[in-house]
Image (cartoon, rainbow, N blue to C red):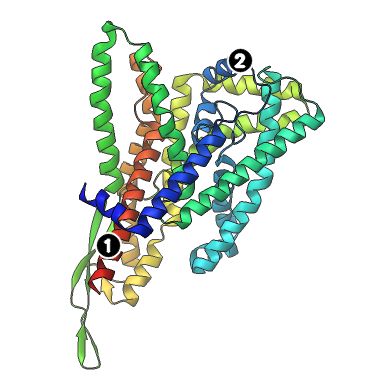
Amino acid sequence: MDKILQIWRIPDLRKKILMVLLWLLVFRVLAAIPIPGIDAFRLNEFFSSNQLFGFLNIFSGGGLSNLSVVMLGVGPYITAVIIMQLLTIVFPQLKKAYYEEGAEGRAKFNRYSRWLTLPLAALQSYGFLNLLASREVLPALTTTGLLTNVAMITAGSIFLMWIGEIISEYKIGNGVSLLIFAGIVSSLPQFIVSSVLTYTPSVLPTYIAFLILSVVVIAAVVFVNEGERKIPVSYAKQVRGNRLYGGVATYLPLKVNQAGVIPIIFAISILLFPQFIAQAASIFSPELSLKLNEIVVNIFNNLVIYSVIYFLLVVVFTYFYTAITFDPKEISKNLQRSGGFIPGIRPGEATAEAISQVVRKTTIFGAFFLGFIAILPNLTQLVTGIQTLTIGGTALLIVVAVALEVMKQIESQLTVREYEGIL
């Protein structure tokens, strides 16, 4: 409570938080403005029969469920960033620019991602509109009407990308993550209402178990997200001039979940890829697109098949992303340059191999935990048979991760101001 009061006593920090809230309000207003000509009944029917679009709705911040002008949300931008991350493996120059050129290299990387967002948003909006028209959710569009809607939806995605970057500049949290966070939180009232409407006395034990398990899952997500494996590191004594440096012992913190929620985002992108191909096929043949969509829906609407594929993808991408972002050899070199070493292990290759072994072991636990949390909503539905009760999943991981990140950034700004006050 004292920290909350302290935040509002600092004019600069208070202004930043209010501006972030204002931009989030702008986003929620845009998410409530639908494109014209929607058949609400067929729209609800379409979403209830296709859970893949439920995931896409998460990344649109809830804008897809009512076909708003920002229906694609930050999805195209996230896809563009993922593609750019994958390209760093194929093109060493791009990897060098991103990981070795510092702020300038990251700025170049982000610029390429923004350029790639535009064609991706246009292509996704075109395919999705054709899919909706084939399901009679939207009336048959003329060429002019289709191009107008595509331009409007693409502009909405670019505008949200811009809002996300503005929010990031306030250093209260990552802008894109906060937009997704706002969309997830905005769906809570609807979740509560639907749970109340479907309540009967016979399911009271299920609801109580759901509340208890929800608290346990949230605690587990926080515990694993903040969990670290500490590797002891010692620094040799060095004499520089008339002073003695080093001779201290510290530790190298390795997070249990090095990849965060990125593996889940990657996995969802792969799961959505067949649907995206089916949508894009409408450019050449609407009939082929409709058939492909039906095949994809029939496969992924089977909860067991879908859960197994989703779990495996999350585990694989956890290892994949950790491998491309965490370089034990580079850490070993940095330790050696600064005079640090792991007790009992020779510097250089031996240190890199020791760090790699620890990372592999911790990643096993982190990968399986992420996979379990990702499919937990499906397991809940299979066990309880109640679709409104869905514990965990992607939404929970994102909400917890974003909340922790915002809290850390606000605390860091408070700490800086405390030091400034002392000086």
Q: Give whichever of 395, 68 is nearer the camera.
A: 68
Image quarter in which the C terminus is found: bottom left
Q: Is residue 414 above or below residue 193?
A: below
Q: Give whichever of 308, 43 is nearer the camera.
A: 43
What's the residue type where badge 1 is placed?
Thr
Mark 2: few/some/many CA within 10 Å (<14, 14-19, 20+): some
Mark nearer the N terminus (2 vs 1): 2
Q: Is residue 53 left or right of residue 375?
A: right
Q: Is residue 423 above or below residue 182?
A: below
Q: Is residue 357 left or right of residue 19?
A: left
Query: Circle 2 — which element?
Result: helix
Name the residue furthest right. Answer: 143
Residue 233 seen anywhere in this rendered image of the structure? yes
Picture disc at residue 185: none
Name the residue furthest bottom. Answer: 242
Residue 310: image x %, image y %? 46, 31
Residue located 37% across and 71% down the image: 333
Q: Name the residue under label 2.
A: 42
Q: Give whichever of 109, 200 is nearer the camera.
A: 200
Discs 2/1, front: 1
Q: Name the residue under label 1.
A: 415
Residue located 36% across and 21% down the image: 192
* Label 2 – label 1 distance at C-alpha: 52 Å
Res 140 → quadrant: top right
What's the residue type where badge 2 is placed?
Arg
Residue 385 seen anywhere in this rendered image of the structure? no
Residue 247: image x %, image y %? 18, 77
